Amino acid sequence: MERKFNNYRGLETTAVCNLMKQMIKRGATDEELLKVVTYFEAAIDFDAANIRLNDAAQKNDVKALAEKYNSFDWTDDIVRYCEADVEATQEAINQLFGIPNGVTVSRRQKTRIPISNIKVGDQIAIPLKGFGTFLATAHKVTNNGAMFIFDGYVAKRPMNEKNTNNGGFEESDLKRWMDTELLASFPDWIKSRIYGLTIPTVGEVIGWNDDWNREHFEKDFDQQLPLMKECKNRSAYFKNELEWGWLRNAMKQEYSSASFAIVYGIGGASCLDASSSCGVRPEFWLVR
């Protein structure tokens, strides 16, 4: 291949930078600029994958091999395929080479690292088909996997269509939705490694130091996650607005047969009727 990416006009990051310049000149809103910044994060991965793919093809003389064994130049086909769809870059590379260990983006180092080396505080960008692209942060790491919680809410939904907390979260309409529609929206490279898709508990997010919480919510026996000790990590946004979000714990039956715990905007715990719409902040484990 003769493509030179150092002067390639089709770099998506260049196009996004030019777009942002025009938007700023023409008085774009903060919300509009935030959408483009979110897309820019995906564009970085897109361009980096294209460059690596091109470089690998040249170093390994893949074009000659393709001409020898195939009737088409698959490297050009893959590049064209990826240029048509940002999300397709990851899928094309997965199909060709596989990603046995996954990759993430380190918040501390701003570099790509293998999932096997992930540490608490590292982040991964996850495109959810039909919902958008979201960052998720590693909050717990063991020898077997890493537990992530999304930084923001991916949707607003009721816990149950009917106003009841019978059966708790595990038997809720929200849990069924997460196990079907939400799980199906994850990219294949994550779906092959994901387990334990749920939402956080009172213990993980708020902790159990508050007497009112201990008295009113079903106990989960979880300790507060280290990053959740900071209020900014307990708070989350939905579509650029500070939002309340569901926690996994039902209220004790002597206080309410209809309510679940929530985390409100500034990071404290409260409760809400199950049929109310509230933010969904997924939690999940990835196999290392």
Image: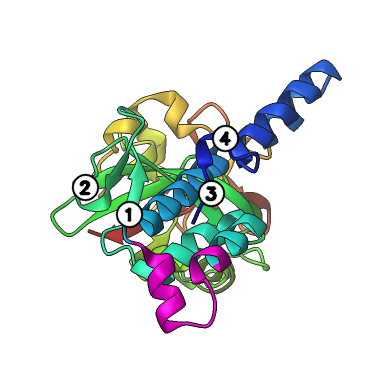
The answer to whether 142 appears left or right of 62 in the picture is left
For mark 4, give the secondary structure.
helix
Q: Earlier in the sequence, mark 1 or mark 3?
A: 3
Q: Residue 59, labelled with which disc? A: 1
Q: Which of marks 3 and 2 is nearer the N terminus?
A: 3
Give the magenta part as a residue range: 61-77
Residue 270 appears in the figure: no
Task: Read off the residue under disc 4.
Answer: 7
Tell me which amino acid carries mark 2: Val
**How far apart are labels 4 and 2 at the CA level?**
41 Å
**How far apart are labels 3 and 4 at the CA level?**
9 Å
The answer to whether 21 appears left or right of 106 in the picture is right
Q: In this view, does 184 lie above or below 123?
A: below
Task: Read off the residue under disc 3.
Answer: 3
The reply to whether the C-beta atoms of the residues labelled 2 and 1 are less than 8 Å apart is no
The reply to whether the C-beta atoms of the residues labelled 3 and 4 are less than 8 Å apart is no
Return the residue nearer the eye: 166 or 237. Answer: 237
- Main secondary structure type of the part rendered in magenta: helix
Tell me which amino acid carries mark 3: Arg
Q: Which of marks 2 and 1 is in front?
A: 1
